[in-house]
Image (cartoon, rainbow, N blue to C red):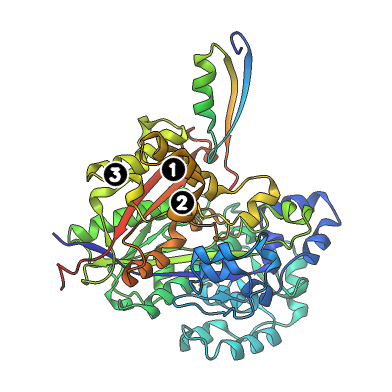
């Protein structure tokens, strides 16, 4: 589903942080063009 | 080997609705919208409402966190009739008195209060249990309102208001050219220092360790004290300890975003166990910047602005007294650089690994203290219930490890966790507000142990993508090492 797609990642510290999402996206063949983690507290 | 114990913990709230306008978010938003300040001022709580707010009574120790389960959310609708200003080792400080503490904390004549206001303030503070005679000298005589207005008109000062919009003083810049000693930053740092002084005096007033006994002090705050050549140079710890008569102590600050308190406890425990120091105090003062951080969520849901208050904490970690709960230095959890950033990886580092070291499982811990942010602040803003998210992740790991059935997950929070009750003040909310409760509950025999799990968002400083975490476990003192 993500193979060859450019992916923009917004993660959350107490949910799923951006680096963890990026690992999944990379494993699925996606191209991470931006990643950032927010902290809502 | 010396066993480190938790000899005391105090929690203080400075209810400062007049300072909400100085929070980072309100400052930025009111600059864009001329009507917003009036809307904010119209939705601030008065002092009686802040005292009667159930999470605040939990924070200062008059109620247990589990007592909150008796009240429907939002808790802003609940007005406790038997609420009290003082707790067993802390208090809810009204804003006028807090301005007095700002002045007491001011070593460089940067805080000025109006004459009449100051006279009334001195009268109010006369019988305060932790006020000292020299504090009244530091409060000085005050200035005429015309002088205050003139100073503010010159543009290098920040106003101090009470009761919404009544001007009663100002904080002036610390340097004409230094961007890190502006009036805004001086006010921010003095708020941290003043609230830290109150918490530190309370902890030394309430427990068996005297100010003279203290060897070392750690600051675990999120402020950055310094000037243009050393922004964040720090040692707010020593600045605070000076005002708490800790004449035999020096100190330093531990910087690790929100999980600095957990780092500090572990480092302090190590120093006690090594015999280097006998009594250490850890202080965390409040954060001005975070006042009103999520005000928009409260306004959107017709709630009062709950982030109208700063939290402050102080803890005494010392050598074994044969009764205070023991810090298990063989159970320290740390989030290593190589651990990974998923929630599973973080909790494996902070909870599973330390427990496995001595053959325990997740359910062997009676209470977990996690990020204890008050959901009355986060949920209206769309940020979820932070402690609940944390507890569901820990419960899910217990299920994956075969320690409990999936059907029991929803009960994990009630049984092994608690509702969030802390002001959303970063380091203040990070597990540590439960320490005073846990100490009492363990000493009363209500629980046997508690684990504290703190996390920090290092990535916010744009130096790394990593987050951080530290944990520690305290348990009943069996009294085998009585002094």
Precedes in sequence: disc 3 or disc 2: 3
Expressed as whole percent of the image width and height from the top left, the position of residue B51 reads 62, 75
User: Alpha-carbon distance for marks 2 and 1?
Assistant: 10 Å
Closer mark to the observer between disc 1 and disc 3: 1
Q: Secondary structure at mark 2?
A: loop
Q: From what the image shows, is residue B411 above or below residue B483?
A: above
CB of mark 1 within 8 Å of CB of mark 3?
no
Name the residue nearer the viewer: B142 or B286. B286
Up-down relation of residue B133 to residue B396 (above or below): below
Q: Which residue is mark 2?
A: B370
Q: Mark 1 and mark 3: span between their CA atoms?
A: 14 Å
Name the residue beneath numbered marker 3.
Answer: B354
Q: CA distance from mark 3 to mark 2?
A: 16 Å
Question: Which of marks 3 and 1 precedes in the sequence?
Answer: 3
Quarter of the rendering occupied by the C terminus of chain B: bottom left
**Tag 1 subunit:** B
Q: In the rendered structure, find residue B394 and report the number of the disc placed on it.
A: 1
Q: Residues within 10 Å of mark 2 (few under 14, many from 20)?
A: many
Q: Is residue B315 visible?
A: yes
| B248 up-or-down from B351: above or below | below
Q: Residue at x 49, y 77 (%)?
A: B87
Q: Mark 2, mark 1: which one is toward the viewer?
A: 1
- From the viewer's side, name the closer residue of B318 and B157: B318
Mark 1 crowd level (few <14, some 14–19, many ≥20, 10 Å Cα): many
Residue B13 percent coordinates (x, y): 55, 69
Residue at x-position 54% and y-position 48%: B388
The correct choice, above or below, for A2 with respect to B433 in the image is above
């Amino acid at each position: 589903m993500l193979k060859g797609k450019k992916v923009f990642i917004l993660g959350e510290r107490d949910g799923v942080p951006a680096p963890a999402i990026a690992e999944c996206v990379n494993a699925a063949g996606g191209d991470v063009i931006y990643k950032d983690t927010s902290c809502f507290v | 080997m010396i066993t480190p114990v938790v000899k005391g913990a105090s929690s203080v709230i400075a209810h400062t609705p007049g300072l909400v306008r100085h929070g980072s978010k309100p400052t930025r938003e009111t600059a864009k919208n001329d009507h917003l300040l009036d809307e904010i001022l119209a939705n601030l709580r008065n002092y009686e409402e802040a005292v009667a707010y159930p999470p605040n009574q939990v924070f200062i120790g008059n109620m247990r966190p589990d007592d909150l389960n008796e009240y429907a959310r939002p808790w802003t609708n609940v007005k406790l009739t038997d609420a009290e200003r003082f707790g067993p080792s802390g208090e809810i400080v009204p804003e006028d008195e807090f301005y007095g503490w700002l002045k007491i904390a001011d070593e460089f004549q940067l805080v000025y209060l109006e004459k009449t206001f100051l006279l009334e303030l001195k009268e109010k503070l006369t019988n305060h249990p932790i006020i000292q005679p020299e504090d009244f000298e530091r409060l000085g005589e005050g200035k005429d309102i015309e002088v205050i207005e003139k100073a503010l008109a010159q543009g290098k000062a920040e106003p101090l208001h009470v009761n919404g919009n009544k001007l009663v003083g100002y904080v002036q810049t610390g340097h004409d050219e230094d961007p890190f000693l502006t009036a805004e930053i001086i006010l921010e740092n003095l708020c941290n220092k003043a609230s830290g002084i109150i918490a530190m005096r309370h902890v030394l007033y309430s427990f068996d360790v005297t100010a003279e006994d203290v060897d070392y002090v750690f600051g675990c705050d999120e402020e950055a004290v310094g000037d243009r050549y050393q922004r964040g140079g720090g040692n707010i710890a020593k600045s605070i300890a000076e005002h708490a008569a800790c004449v035999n102590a020096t100190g330093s600050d531990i910087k690790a975003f929100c999980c600095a308190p957990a780092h500090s406890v572990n480092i302090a425990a190590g120093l006690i166990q090594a015999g280097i120091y006998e009594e250490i105090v850890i202080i965390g003062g409040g954060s001005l910047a975070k006042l009103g951080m999520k005000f928009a969520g409260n306004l959107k849901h017709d709630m009062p602005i709950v982030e109208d208050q700063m939290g402050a904490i102080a803890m005494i970690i010392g050598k074994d007294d044969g009764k205070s709960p023991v810090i298990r230095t063989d159970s320290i959890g740390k989030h290593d650089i190589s651990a990974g950033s998923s929630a599973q990886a973080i909790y494996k580092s902070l909870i599973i690994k330390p427990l496995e070291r001595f053959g325990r499982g997740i359910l062997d811990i009676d209470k977990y203290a996690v990020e204890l942010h008050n959901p009355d602040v986060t949920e209206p803003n769309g940020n979820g219930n932070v402690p609940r998210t944390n507890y569901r992740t820990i419960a899910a790991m217990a299920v994956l490890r075969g320690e409990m059935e999936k059907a029991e997950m929803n009960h994990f929070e009630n049984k092994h966790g608690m509702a969030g009750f802390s002001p959303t003040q970063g380091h203040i909310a990070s597990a540590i507000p439960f320490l005073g409760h846990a100490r009492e509950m363990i000493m009363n025999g209500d629980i046997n142990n508690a684990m504290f799990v703190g996390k920090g968002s290092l990535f916010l400083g744009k130096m790394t993508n990593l987050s951080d975490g530290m944990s520690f476990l305290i348990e009943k003192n069996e009294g085998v090492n009585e002094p």
